[in-house]
Image (tube, rainbow, N blue to C red):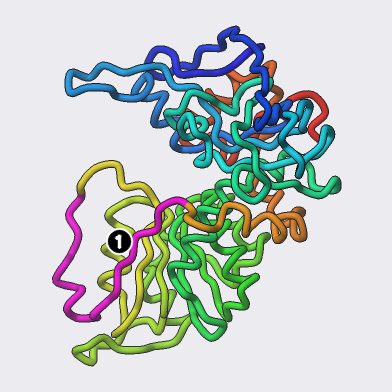
Amino acid sequence: MKSVQTGAPGAIAVVDIERPAPGPRDVLLRMRAVGICGTDVTFLHLGGMPIGPDGQTRAVPLGHEPAGEVVEVGAEVTDVKVGDRVVVNPQAAPSGIIGCGGALGGMSEYLLIEDAVVGTSLAVIPDEVPYDVAALNEPMAVALHCVNRSEAKPGDKVLVFGAGPIGLGATIWLKLRGVAHVTVADVLPERLRTALAVGADAVIDSSREDVAARLAELHGTGANSLGQPRPDTDIYIDAAGVAAVVNTALTSAKWGAKLVTVAVHKKPEPIDLGAILRSEMTILGSQGYPTEIFEVTPQLARHWDRFARLISHRVPFADVEHAFRLALTPGAAEKVIVTFGDEG
């Protein structure tokens, strides 16, 4: 079968490998759709996964956002059957995280699910959910964990920085949670249009608008610990990953506001720590999905048409090199899903 792994820096390699044979506790999936993530792009820039201080790397099988169809079931597996449509927990694989340094990658024609257990390593999705939307299960779990970390309540007013897939996913989860007002800030007009389409109450073009002033119009006016006027925004979510976003949140924060960072900051950057004293802001990190990987699945299925708006490009596996070129080109695509055969 064909499988995609990292090649030279900035490129993929499509290689021929043996189709896996499931053991008694395993399941074999025919891939139907796999998302491309920023982590994949990072591996491609590096030319693989670093293995030592001298800059050496090893090739990495790619694809940690898979959705597929069960085609073989081991003799000891009783809770899935051939023909089931499933999403996968890439972190549950005994041989390492699927598509993120482990021995297996979902960007392949077939994927072995080792020690397959429903609710741990995979979950069955309803027939009506398109495979391309099902492939959003993993990144939407990341977005849900961020929202869970925020502990947002219905009466809260929230600003999400960054209208990429995670920021937009967080926006959807916040609104499904009943949060009163969610504003999304970004610098790209098309992203802001998508934010409104998935349920944001308002958007801010941070390339030309004063974020704090606009927030005060939208959320009202509060005060920091010194009594200075600040937007009455309760929660800021950093899904952008740039220092300017963090500093905007810190300097805009009212007393007791909260900042949740889910974006990857690729290098250390200066931030205004002094501003924390003026707001006593709580800063939280959000990494992965300790419990959320299959908590998202029923809601994803129920609202799949809403989540489908996050997908900007659907590219057949036969043209997978084009799919990764899109993902590697800044501004060329938002969310690229690679499809295999009939992805419906």
**Which kind of residue does numbered mark 1 sit on?**
Val
State which quadrant residue 65 falls in: top right
Q: With 253 as the anchor, is 103 left or right in this view?
A: right
Residue 269: x and y in percent read 20, 50
Q: Secondary structure at mark 1?
A: helix
Q: Is residue 36 left or right of residue 287?
A: right
Residue at the spot 66% in from the left edge and 61% down from the top edge: 198
Examine the rendering and report whether any part of residue 8 can be seen. Answer: yes
Instruction: Give yes or no for residue 280 being in the magenta stretch.
Output: yes
Q: Nearer the viewer, residue 322 or 101?
A: 101
Identify the residue at horizontal 69%, vertical 16% (top origin).
318
Q: Is residue 48 left or right of residue 61?
A: left
Identify the residue at the far left of this view.
274
Residue 207 visible within the image: no
Judging depth in this view, the residue of 21 and 58 nearest the camera is 21
| Front one among 80 and 292 | 80
Where 207 sits versus 228, above or below? above
Tell me the residue at 50%/66% (across/down).
147
Tell me the quarter of the picture where residue 117 sits: top right
Q: Above or below — where is 269 with respect to 34?
A: below
> Residue 232: image x %, image y %?
40, 84
Q: Residue furthest bottom?
A: 227
Q: Please say if 87 is above or below 187.
A: above
Q: Position of residue 130 (x, y in %)?
A: 79, 43
Residue 41: x %, y % from top left: 44, 30
Magenta extent: 269-288
| Residue 16 among those drawn in magenta | no
* Residue at 26 percent of width and 16 percent of height: 56
Residue at image mark 1: 246
Q: Residues within 10 Å of mark 1 (few under 14, many from 20)?
A: many
